[in-house]
């Protein structure tokens, strides 16, 4: 290294020192690389750590762990978006009220069937409380009815009814909000054994409208498997026209009834 006293000499000394440092780093990288196999990921990480012992090592470790983490996060986000999309498609459509209910031809098919039906009536007075009031007024004091359910089964039934009522009234703050939730709820579980365009229709009669038939329906395109369809007669429709006294639910394909489920009061 040449050392001079002039301005130019200071510059030459500075660059000589920096070149020497770069050469030293290059020799360290070369020695570390020759010490192990270049195919070993841990060895490469260790070599870069020894060579740079600072920012370079930290950067290599971050990059080595960042790519798998990003891949895993991408899979997670993809699954979440797919799930939300499925629920959005299934829950976005609301039943359409028909202005005129026309009779349809019946062509029942084994490819379509109803699996289960869930009915719930939500009124101002809980159902279990109404049952207890009725039992207390009709039975004689000190006498137990032979047809009354056991205390254990009655407790389980009351708990399920209470939960269903709280579920339907969730989010209703004022009395007006609660009154708009009062009514009859219908949940139908049905199955299609082959892909088809299906329309689910609920036909029903209300107490104050006597024999007048109303209907709601929801259409599905190219569906297969087990599905759930929800209908409800609530709010002003329920408070003005009364409770639903009879109903039937239909699965319709190409304008024909392929499956049917009805109440015992339906004619």
Image (cartoon, grey):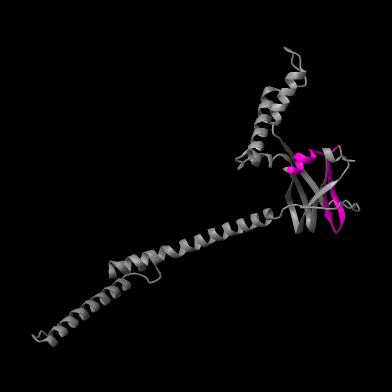
Residue drawn at x 17%, y 81% is 14
Given residues 52 and 234, the one toward you in this image is 234
Residue 242, above or below 63 = above
Q: Residue at x 18, y 79 (%)?
A: 17
Q: Is residue 141 in the magenta section?
A: no
Residue 122's image quarter? Answer: top right
Name the residue: 77% across, 48% down: 190
Q: Is residue 167 visible?
A: yes
- Give coordinates of residue 174: x percent, y percent: 61, 39
Q: Position of residue 130 (x, y in %)?
A: 72, 27
- Quadrant where the C terminus sits is top right
Q: Position of residue 51 (x, y in %)?
A: 28, 70
Decide which of 241, 119 is in the foreground and name it. 241
Q: Which residues are magenta?
A: 236-264
Quadrant (top left/top right/bottom left/bottom right) for the N terminus: bottom left
Q: Quadrant of residue 247?
A: top right
Q: Is residue 259 magenta?
A: yes
Left or right, 25 with reference to 244? left
User: Residue at position x 38%, y 64% from top?
Assistant: 62
């Amino acid at each position: 290294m040449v050392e001079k006293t002039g301005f130019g000499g200071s510059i030459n000394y500075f660059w000589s020192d920096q070149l020497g440092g770069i050469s030293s780093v290059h020799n360290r990288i070369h020695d570390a690389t020759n010490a192990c196999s270049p195919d070993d990921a841990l060895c490469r990480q260790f070599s870069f750590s020894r060579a740079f012992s600072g920012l370079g090592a930290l950067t290599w470790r971050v990059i080595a762990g960042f790519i798998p983490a990003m891949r895993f996060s991408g899979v997670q986000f993809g699954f979440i978006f797919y799930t939300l999309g499925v629920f959005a498609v299934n829950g976005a459509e609301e039943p359409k009220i028909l202005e005129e209910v026309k009779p349809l031809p019946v062509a029942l098919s084994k490819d379509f069937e109803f699996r289960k039906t869930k009915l719930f009536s939500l009124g101002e007075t809980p159902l279990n409380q109404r049952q207890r009031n009725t039992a207390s007024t009709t039975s004689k004091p000190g006498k137990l009815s032979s047809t009354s359910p056991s205390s254990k089964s009655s407790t389980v039934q009351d708990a399920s009814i209470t939960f269903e009522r709280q579920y339907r009234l969730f989010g209703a703050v004022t009395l007006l909000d609660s009154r708009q939730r009062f009514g009859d709820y219908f949940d139908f579980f049905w199955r299609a054994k082959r892909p088809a365009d299906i329309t689910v229709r609920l036909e029903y009669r209300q107490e104050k409208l006597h024999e007048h038939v109303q209907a709601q329906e929801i259409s599905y395109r190219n569906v297969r498997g087990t599905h759930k369809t929800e209908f409800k007669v609530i709010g002003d429709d329920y408070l003005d026209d009364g409770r639903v006294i009879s109903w039937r639910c239909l699965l319709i394909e190409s304008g024909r009834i392929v499956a049917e489920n009805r109440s015992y009061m339906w004619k």
